């Protein structure tokens, strides 16, 4: 079994911040052929990371050669008296999937959220992303809302 290391994103490491932001913007393209993003959206993601130091948690997974193979970004949010986590991104390199990386990333995020007073974690998953839906169900996620979209082009 391969060894992985998991570290919290260092917001002072511009290279890692840019890579996390680029992944965040580009990953939906893996299952949504209509997805595109711009350099401007990556810049906004970098700014979002840098401006939410205490309200977000980004953990990176690296292989034995210190190459980035996974990333999970959750945001701590609150409404009324409720604190909850909202998944912004989860990505694992295709060569490292089905090896427990995503599960470990999700478990680390849940621990961080609990430690910060959150009582729930929420996520949105594209219908086409069957593997992520299956993993979430395996980890105890339940469908709470159904998002719908209609193209009006």
Image: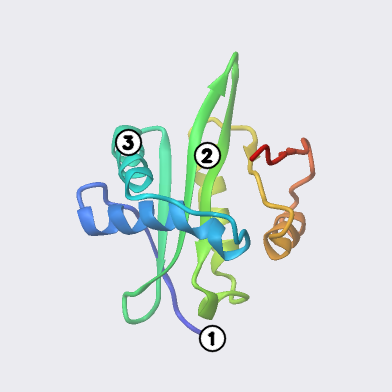
Residue, disc 2: 113
Measure the C-alpha gap from mark 1 to mark 2.
28 Å
N-terminal of the pair, mark 3 or mark 2, is: 3
Circle number at residue 29: none
Say whether disc 3 or disc 1 marks the residue closer to the N-terminus. Answer: 1
In the picture shown, does residue 35 fall above or below 152?
Answer: below
- Where residue 150 sits, quadrant-wise, is top right
User: Marks 3/2: CA distance?
Assistant: 14 Å
SS label for mark 3: loop
Disc 1 element: loop
Q: Is residue 71 above or below residue 85?
A: below
Looking at the rendered image, the quarter that the N terminus falls into is bottom right
> Residue visible at 60% across and 13% down?
80
| Residue marked by disc 3 | 53
Q: Are marks 3 and 1 in contact (CB under 8 Å)?
A: no
Write down the quadrant of residue 56 in the picture. top left
Q: Nearer the viewer, residue 50 or 8?
A: 50
The residue where tag 1 is placed is 1
At horizontal 56% and vertical 36% (from top left) the residue drawn is 85
Looking at the picture, how far across and down is residue 3, in whole percent?
A: 45, 79
- Whether residue 47 appears in this view of the structure is yes
């Amino acid at each position: 079994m391969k060894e992985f290391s998991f570290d919290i994103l260092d917001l002072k490491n511009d290279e890692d911040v840019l890579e996390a932001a680029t992944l965040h913007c580009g990953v939906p393209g893996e299952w949504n052929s209509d997805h595109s993003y711009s350099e401007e959206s990556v810049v906004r993601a970098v700014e979002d990371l840098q401006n939410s130091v205490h309200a977000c948690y980004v953990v990176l997974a690296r292989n034995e050669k210190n190459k980035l193979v996974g990333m999970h970004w959750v945001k701590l949010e609150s409404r009324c008296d409720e604190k909850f986590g909202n998944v912004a991104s989860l990505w694992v390199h295709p060569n490292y999937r089905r090896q427990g990386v995503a599960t470990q990333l999700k478990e680390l995020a849940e621990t961080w959220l609990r430690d910060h007073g959150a009582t729930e974690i929420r996520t949105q998953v594209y219908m086409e992303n069957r593997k992520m839906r299956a993993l979430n169900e395996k980890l105890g996620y339940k469908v709470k809302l159904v998002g719908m979209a209609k193209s009006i082009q």
